[in-house]
Amino acid sequence: MPHLPATGWLKELSEEALFQIETKGSFRFYQPQETVFLQEKELDNYYIVVSGLANAYHQNDEGKRWIVSLFSKGDLFPHVGLINDEHVYPANSETLSTCTLFVIRRDEMNTIFASYPEIRLHLTLFLTEKSRELMDRFSDSILGTAADRMISFLKKLAIHSGIRKTDGRYLINLGLTEQYIAEYIGVTPETVSRVLNKLYAEGRAEKIGRKKLLIRLKE
């Protein structure tokens, strides 16, 4: 049976707090590209990523989509309705790989926050960190080059969901097409391909099988 990972939003929570959260929800398994929730539908559940990668995205009437957020191990989503009265999902969400998500009903989440100040404090810190990440991403999109945005994305993916090898490199299971990455960081798929090829040529990254790579992060 899977358990909640003591990482991300759950990092440094006590065993008792983790246990109390686990008793209020259930684990659910998803295949790649499976819908988690739809925009404007009633916000009835929250999700914690146990393994895999999921996203949140908007889509216009012509079918064009843009990625708002990516969620990896330990992430809680969506972020709305936790400290306000929002009652609908603000975006669509789907899995990008095989995923295990912990699903907890909104009313149960509110019960937990009311009963355990320790968990509510972690929520406040979590939302503060997410706000900082959004500001950094906005800054990157305005001030950084396309290559800078791509490198920043790979670093975040490595730190949050990569596996660090003995030689210091990170193994990343992208699970994403170049189109998805391009939509998330606001560049063209050709730019994503060009930056990746440059990293391969410089020896800073190595392609390992399909949609996997080893990357060395600069200190």
Image (cartoon, rainbow, N blue to C red):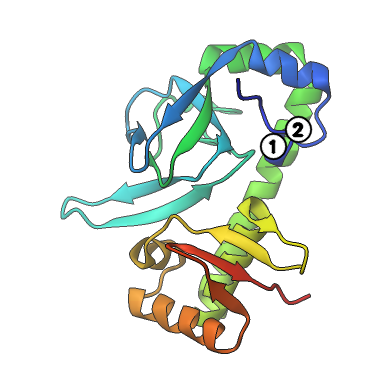
Q: Which residue: 73% across, 16% down?
A: 19
Quadrant that contains the C terminus = bottom right
State which mark lies toward you, 2 or 1.
1
Q: Quadrant of residue 203?
A: bottom right
Q: Is residue 61 left or right of residue 6?
A: left
Badges 2 and 1: C-beta atoms under 8 Å apart? yes
Mark 1 crowdedness (10 Å alpha carbons): few <14, some 14-19, many ≥20: many
Apparent side of residue 35 relative to residue 185 in the rendered image (left or right):
left
Q: Pick the residue in front: 98 or 23.
A: 98
Residue 102 occupies quadrant = top right
Disc 1: which residue: 9
Side of 218 relative to 35 (left or right)? right
Q: Residue at x 57, y 63 (%)?
A: 137
Local SS, label 2: helix
The residue tagged 2 is: 122
Q: Say which label, 2 or 1, has the lower sequence index.
A: 1
Question: What residue lies at 69% left-to-right and 33% top-to-bottom?
Answer: 5
Residue 150 seen in render: yes
The amino acid beneath tag 1 is Trp
Q: In the rendered image, which quarter contains the N terminus?
A: top right
The answer to whether any part of residue 135 appears in the image is no
Q: Position of residue 14 (x, y in %)?
A: 83, 24
> What is the x, y in percent for residue 185?
46, 67
CA gap between label 2 and label 1 equals 7 Å
Residue 172: name its quadrant.
Answer: bottom right
